[in-house]
Amino acid sequence: MKLYFMGLAGTAMGHAALLAREAGHEVLGADRGVYPPMSTVLAAAGITLHEGYDPERLARLAPDLVVITGDLAFAGGKDEYAAARVWLERELWPVLTPDPGAPLDRDRL
């Protein structure tokens, strides 16, 4: 399974990504202001880490699952929320609902 972690360089998310990678999943993700030691630990494990959030990149990578840290989902900046929302609306929401035209509101994230 291809897993994409938003907020990947945080301590909890980084370790969750490492566990997923160890379990055999393809793991990649994004964060802002990434620096060692987490950046080097992730790279050594073969995890691709992108700087910043980009909804087009997320759509192009077409992950099977996007893992969003609570900070981004509820208190994150506009870019993070926009990237997650674009992916949810275009990729995930149509699969989850029988009515893809139904609105996706923030409370459903």
Image (tube, grey):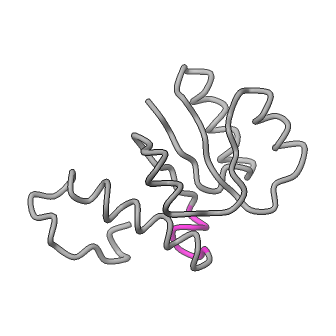
Total of numbered circles in the picture? 0
Q: Eyeballing the image, is 56 above or below 47?
A: below
Rendering coords of residue 47 (x, y %): 68, 34
Rendering coords of residue 108 (x, y %): 32, 69
Secondary structure mostly taken by the magenta-highlighted segment of the chain:
helix
Of residues 63 and 9, which is closer to you in this image?
A: 63
Q: Residue furthest right?
A: 36
Looking at the rendering, in which quadrant would you find the C terminus? Answer: bottom left
Rendering coords of residue 64 (x, y %): 39, 40
User: Where does the magenta region start and end?
Assistant: 70-76
When asked about the image quadrant of residue 79, the answer is bottom right
Q: Is residue 56 magenta?
A: no
Q: Residue at x 30, y 54 (%)?
A: 92
Q: Residue at x 50, y 39 (%)?
A: 3
Rendering coords of residue 100 (x, y %): 16, 64
Q: Eyeballing the image, is 60 above or below 48?
A: below
Q: Eyeballing the image, is 77 above or below 4?
A: below
When asked about the image quadrant of residue 52, the answer is bottom right
Left/right placement of residue 76 relative to residue 92 reads: right
Of residues 70 and 105, which is closer to you in this image?
A: 105
Q: Residue at x 89, y 42 (%)?
A: 37
Looking at the rendering, in which quadrant would you find the N terminus? Answer: top left
Q: Residue at x 22, y 76 (%)?
A: 103
When asked about the image quadrant of residue 78, the answer is bottom right
